[in-house]
Amino acid sequence: MIALRRARWRFPVICLVIFFYFIPAENSTGADIKGPITLEADSLAYDKEEDTYHAKGNVLIVFTGGILMAESVVLNRATNEANAEGYVMLISDGDILEGDTVDFNLESKTGVAYQGKMFLAANHFYIRGPIIEKTGEASYHAVNATATTCDGDAPDWRLMGRELDVTIEGYGTIKEAEFLAGNVPLLYSPYMLFPAKRDRQSGFLTPYMGYSADKLGFDFELPYYWAISEDTDATFYQRYMDKRGFKEGVEFRYYLSKDTFGTFYGDFMNDVARITETGETTGGIPRDWQSDHKRWSYFLNHETTFDPTFTLRTDIHKVSDSFYFKDFSSHNYYLDNYSQTEADKFRKVPFYGDETLGSLDSTVRLNKNWQLYNLTALVSYTDNFATASNDATLQSYPAITLTGVKRPIFGTPLNFEFAAAYDYYYRNEGQKGHLFDLQPTLTLPLRWRDFLQFTPQMGVKSTSWSRDDDVDTGQSKQGSRELYTLGATATTEIHRIFDVGGEDIDKIRHGIRPELTYTYVPGATQTDLPDFVAAIPEQNTLTYSLTNTLLAKLNEKDGGKSYLEFLRFKLSQTYDFTEPTRPFSEVDMELDIKPIKYFSLMARNRYSVNSGQWLQTNYDMNISDWRGDSATVGYRNAKTVTNVVDPGMATSPFAAFQYSLAAGEEIDISLKAVVTNSFDFIYVLRKDELDSIILEKTYGFKYHKQCWSVEVYYTESQNDKQFMVGFSLLGLGKYGGK
């Protein structure tokens, strides 16, 4: 922001402040100015014959939308024009125009500055030139001008040209343009266009440029953005890869109302690559592409809220083949729009579209809520990339669930809830058919003073099915199963508050919460089940857990209070009464530590009391400081374990699941070092310790100044090498790519 130089407004020797509405003199052609004008100066004189005010010495004129400061001003009452001399500063709608002499019309807000300098606040643009003309409320014209977003009188870069035109919320143009780094000319163009807008507007977006040694070759993408209307827009992606061919894509976004909005994206290309990779397979079939392949993908996210209780949402994702994300893992639409939250209504890709993606799920969901019930209708489809054909993949459409919320029965302490579900499971190869489930549950919440909560529960799970396939299994195509469940949960919490009385920490609350959950599911014969009905094993278990928390009450600088849970530690285990030799399950450990702003540690571990081994150890630690230095270290270690009842699901009387931990050991390291105020060093390492394989190694640095930055990265992965150079100019965008 330009400092208000020479704006030392002392109390004038003569101070005349005049409030008036400009009314044109008789027979005058001047326009009427809406609003009051304030004029202040050391001396002020009025020429009745010329109908002008002559102000000298620290002149200050305040008008609607701006102020004018100068050493002397002649203000014509008839034409509303001001001729200002000396050091002149005009502030109009946030923009600042300076010059030795300025002619300005207070009504039209147009004028000319000589030996001028302009600052456009909306885009942080500085314009200098011998003549700068304000041609409208948001447009400017300059001769022999320079433009930059750098602060100071010696900018790091600037655009220079014979003529410059710029419109706020539009574009700027320069004729016979040169790009200078300091005083060294680097580029020349007879005509240059640059953005000068804040709001969305049609035009080309920042291009993507890259090089992939093994997969894509030279890679260039130029998006074009089309602001169709206030409620719709589209982006067209034109991408060329010299080892693949030309790829076209389009994104269409619409916001019909706050209750109806969505995004559609699709792309298509004729892939000319010839690939023979013996080790690369899908479902055991090697890839041997010796002819062109039609490659495509599309994505649809749509939401409609008919009323606060009735919503529709679609999340549909499809790709042409299982190699799509393997081939385009360095850059694609789905990576750019991946989000783990839904804070952005138009950035809702729920999966990370790189080579590790094993399947793709599409869903259409309709949800209706009543005061006591919820109805959900779901259609889902899964593309399994681990198989050569999707014919045997089990699909569910539709899946309809009716849930009754927990509520007292006739005003008694006894609560009732239920869930009823219908699913139709379909596939081209294998068993398919109808499945019906009904699960009513009774609970009786009991409380002893404020010390103990005890909740017994009893439920029934009734399941019936009907197959409509032609698979001969020797079993009946219709059947049913009824199981009852019993259970109870007991929990309490004790705590103590420590009065610290520190400058930052007022108090600390230590809480200890033990919990017991008993679940009983009797054994039943389930040998005639179709493969789309999950077997429910016998269960007679007691799960116990202990959770410790430390909660700090903090003193804020403004006098307010805030709370921070800086430690949480939980241990849980299950005892199985049906296992005479090894009744104790693994011990699950959860640890979260965040004692200060710049440090956090998370651990998720599992220990086998039977083998004396850690089956799973996961650690994530993050350290940072006030300068911006940061280090993130992740460690993953899992041994192969199968056919184990997940103790975390034992709290549900109907849940009996298995988990499988794939063997592996991985180390993830990410470092950022702020070497100087302008130079950052970045290092990323992902290593498979079990097989001694470097999954990813990245070296990079970023050099950044107030108005520009440059980034350089080199990445090695198992199947590619990538080099990225990018630079950005404040106000002009970012350029570069992998």
Image: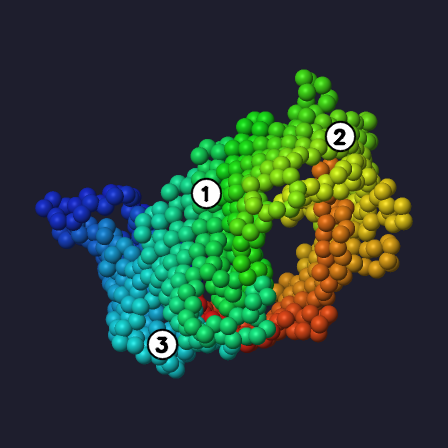
Look at 52% across and 62% down and name the residue there.
Answer: 322
> Quadrant of the image for the N terminus?
bottom left
Look at 30% across and 71% down and name the residue there.
Answer: 192
Work out which residue is located at the far bottom of the displayed protein and give it. Answer: 184
- Alpha-carbon span between mark 1 and mark 3: 46 Å
Q: Quadrant of residue 82?
A: bottom left
Coloring scheme of the render? rainbow
The residue identified by callout 2 is 457
Q: Where is residue 47 shown, x and y percent of the image? A: 18, 52
Work out which residue is located at the far right of the displayed protein and give it. Answer: 581
Q: Amino acid at mark 3?
A: Phe
Q: Is residue 698 visible?
A: no
Q: Quadrant of residue 654?
A: top right
Numbered badge on residue 303: 1
Work out which residue is located at the far top of the displayed protein and give it. Answer: 410
Q: Where is residue 212 shown, x and y percent of the image? A: 49, 75
Q: Is residue 530 visible?
A: yes
Reply above or below: 696 against 512.
below
Query: SS at mark 2?
Result: strand
Reply above or below: 328 against 417.
below
Numbered badge on residue 138: none
Q: Where is residue 383 shown, x and y percent of the image? A: 53, 55
- Alpha-carbon span between mark 3 and mark 2: 76 Å
- Which is more N-terminal, label 1 or label 2? 1
Query: SS at mark 1?
Result: strand
Q: Nearer the viewer, residue 603 or 85?
A: 603
Look at 41% across and 71% down and name the residue there.
Answer: 292
Q: Amino acid at mark 2?
A: Gln
User: Crowding near pointer 1: few (<14 within 10 Å), some, many (20+)?
Assistant: many
The residue identified by callout 3 is 179
Q: Which of label 3 and label 2 is nearer to you?
A: 2
